[in-house]
Amino acid sequence: MIQLDVTLYPQEIDPAGKRDPQAISTADYQKLIRDALDDLFPDVTDRRERRELMALLSPGATDLLRAKVMADPSLIGQRVIIDVPFSDDLDQLAKGRIDAESETATRRVTDKQIEWFQRLEQRGLVRQAFNTTLFTAGDSRSPELAGIWGSLVGTFWTMLITMAIAFPLAIGAAIYLEEFAPKNRWTAMIEVNINNLAAVPSIVFGLLGLAVFLNFFGLPRSAPLVGGLVLALMTLPIIIIASRAALKAVPPSIREAALGVGASQVQTVFHHVVPLAMPGMLTGAILGMAHALGETAPLLMIGMVAFIVDIPGGPLDPATVMPVQIYLWADAPERAFVERSSAAIVILLGFLILMNLIAVMLRKRFERKW
């Protein structure tokens, strides 16, 4: 990052002096930053060299200055110190990933830019800092300003809808099939289909969501609601199979003892069998959610691959999720997005580890001996 001493000329930002938000928003902040660079490098007067000089900074530098002034209009007319990120190429140079001694044709920074960067370093205006923007902003075309907060919120809404739909349906289906359903060819066919659905590629569920939820029902594209519905369909078989296995693990003597003292079948199931099987059910549900959290293919089919800058405010707003955000950043041409995607992968792995730890804790918490 580079520390710029910017003078916020009132006539440049708010000509009428009325603190008009529209005027403040549309001011020419690029000129103010250019003036600050000119103060640092008064010897650079050639137009082409001045363009190279501006290329030292991230394209989002003007957005940072605009946001700072809009958050505190009292800064107008003052001199402020603002930390501005370098451009992608200069960031790689600062981190030692570009050899300044290599041939000019093999690197993306010019000799002049390297000289200016070294002059800034000698004056103590270059510093490295942890980029907190990664956790507070949405996506951006500039890697220096891109964040994962938008995808985190989208993931929250998607997983919330998935859990709200898949968990009760899967638990109810498992209890019915294991405890109440008659053993005939129809239930056998249902069981076979559930087992087969657990092995269906996830992209098929994405095609189903595209055909049914988007084209037939007309639900909004790229919405967490649609993503949650698709992931719920994909997760249902996994939770049903895990829940049935947990119910089968309850010893028959528990059922026989409850029925022997006069309990009905419903009382036996819900008062004795289900509480004993609940740790396995919860474990299966959490592992199913962890599986859904890492899915990308079905969400690509329903449009959650879109470039979303705004933070979603609800389940019907356009959004993306963590795996798709990683996919987008990994495919971006700017090299600084490699670091963003790596950080997002670490955060996603942290969530998955946390969910598995919660599954283990719930199993220990509700586990009963018999």
Image (cartoon, rainbow, N blue to C red):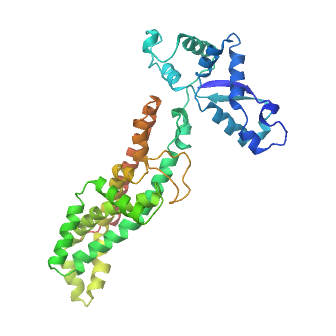
Query: Residue visible at 35% across and 53% down?
Result: 298
Where in the figure is residue 200, as x and y percent of width and height? 24, 57
Find residue 155 and report its horizontal and vertical position in percent: 45, 53
Residue 258 occupies which quadrant of the picture?
A: bottom left
The residue lying furthest to the front in this view is 215
Would residue 156 be found to the left or right of residue 202 on screen?
right
| Quadrant of the frame with the C terminus | bottom left
Q: Is residue 343 left or right of residue 27?
A: left
Which quadrant of the structure image shows residue 338?
top left
Nearer the observer, 241 or 108: 108
Q: Position of residue 331 (x, y in %)?
A: 40, 36
Q: Nearer the viewer, residue 325 or 262?
A: 325
Q: Across the whole image, how many numbered discs are drawn on residues? A: 0
Q: Residue furthest right?
A: 17
Tell me if I can see residue 248 in this picture: no
In-image side of 14 versus 263 (left or right) = right
> Image point 54% across, 13% down: which residue?
114
Compared to residue 1, the image places residue 236 above or below, namely: below
Can see residue 368? Answer: yes
Residue 144 location (% of width, % of height): 54, 32
Q: Is residue 271 above or below residue 10?
A: below
Q: Quadrant of the N terminus?
A: top right
Residue at image location 28% in from the left, 80% down from the top = 269
Is the residue 42 above or below the residue 313 in the image? Answer: above
Examine the image and state in which quarter residue 136 appears: top right
Compared to residue 111, the image places residue 96 above or below, namely: below
